[in-house]
Amino acid sequence: MHMQSSRRRFLGQSAGALSSIAMTSLADANGGSPSLAATHFAPKAKQVIEIFCSGAISHVDTFDYKPELIRLEGKPMPGQENLVSFQGPNGNLTAPLWKFRPRGQTGKMISDLVPQIGSIADELCFIHSLTNKSNTHGPAENVMNTGFTFDGFPSMGAWVNFALGSENENLPAFVAIEDPRGMPQSGPNNWASGFLPAAVQGTPFSTTKPIRHLQRPDSVSPHADRSARQTLLRLEREMRRKFSGDQTIAARAASYELAARMQLSVPDVVSLDEESGHTRRLYGADSKNETKAAFARNCILARRLIERGVRFVQLFNGAYASGGRINWDGHSRLKEQYDVHGEILDQPVAGLLKDLKQRGMLESTLVIFATEFGRMPMFQAGTFGRDHNPNGFTCWLAGAGVKRGFSYGATDDFGFAATEGKATVHDFHATILHLLGLDHKKLTFYHNGIHRRLTDVHGHVIKDVLA
């Protein structure tokens, strides 16, 4: 999959390079017919759902149990008595604000903030030793979803789409579902194509926010709409013959063709009318909490997209910077704000995992639970909240190819820094690609004189988490 020597195959003759409809257009442009692309080795996972908690959910209040943090509450952290972090000086150690309890047969300690996620602890594979190279939300979100702090790099979903494409030509291969409260801090960077072909970028929509400009205007008749598309297709084909190497023309034509199919397919997948009352209750879509119900519907949508062959679904929980009001950035009133956010997150995510399992879909679907960094084991001086902490935090995986009821790595006694099995985001990405049958060192794209890849020049597969 090195792009310099096999670029024509990827961009013109491999259905794995882009979504099926986009590949058809590019294959036509190069005079070839699309053929299925092979992975580097047999994949354990075929599809991905990434649940991303924007704003940095606190690991020490959710999944990373630290008895010493409880025992030494109110005292300075040894060796860090005068710690100054992102927003300034920190106070003394602050115990978790919710009680931790043993969950499942494994007895995994998970807090009462997320009890329903705790109820599926035996399905989860925790990575407690992740680190991030940035302590600022936007750049750190970029790192978690693109591998780089700067804007302009392809997202993880775009890389996967580029390599594997979709199993449904009527839907995008990569869909980003925004939180009901708004767009994440780094916005479209999280699902952008960067320097990869434009056709592999994520398509953002949700149950409450439809795809913009998808339906024809009422003032345009169906006949006129079809005639315009046919004329446009003829013009695009002529342009592709004249400029056969222009990816932008091919991607634009592919987007028009896909949009025509999506006019029929998207309303069906977004409509939850056929979902049973039992399913709605499982996810919490019947909740009187409107935000929770909307997020639950987004979780159902994620499952419906995966059912229909969409390759990568990015599901956001939490929106942009707001002082923690509508995301997990709990600097000043963490307990008050997290009580709100925890209710919105907990049941829908647990319901999604339970639903995937009961439908037999968890065997081929990798579920990623991620955030940009963790939070400090003490309150900021003069506040009731925790500052940013990129030195050690928790994400988890579930489903295809990963160990169930397993914990990898550890932070120190207070949850301040990774000390065992320290893992970078590049390691995390390398592991995800490996589960999809992709070697992160071989999935490259030649751009501006460099063989670019999701993991830059770093990354090792975290083999201990593989089933």
Image (tube, rainbow, N blue to C red):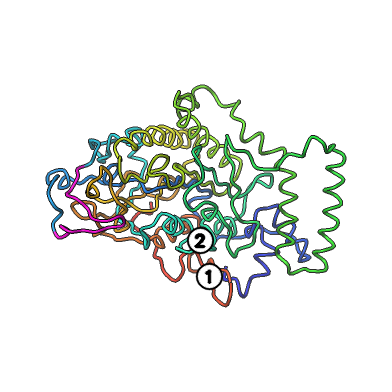
Q: Is residue 413 above or below residue 296?
A: below
Residues 26 and 39: in front is: 26
- Residue 438's tag is 2
Q: Is residue 52 above or below residue 139?
A: above
Residue at 85% in and 47% down: 228
Left or right of 210: which side holds 348?
left
Residues 318 and 296: in front is: 318
Q: Amino acid at mark 2?
A: Leu
Q: Quadrant of the N terminus?
A: bottom right
Whether residue 83 appears in magenta in the rendering, the answer is yes
Residue at 77% in and 38% down: 217
Q: Residue furthest bottom?
A: 449
Residue at 53% in and 63% down: 153
Q: Amino acid at mark 1?
A: Arg
Whether residue 373 appears in magenta in the rendering, the answer is no
Q: How many marks?
A: 2
Magenta stretch, residue numbers: 79-95
Residue denoted by label 1: 452
Q: Secondary structure at mark 1?
A: strand
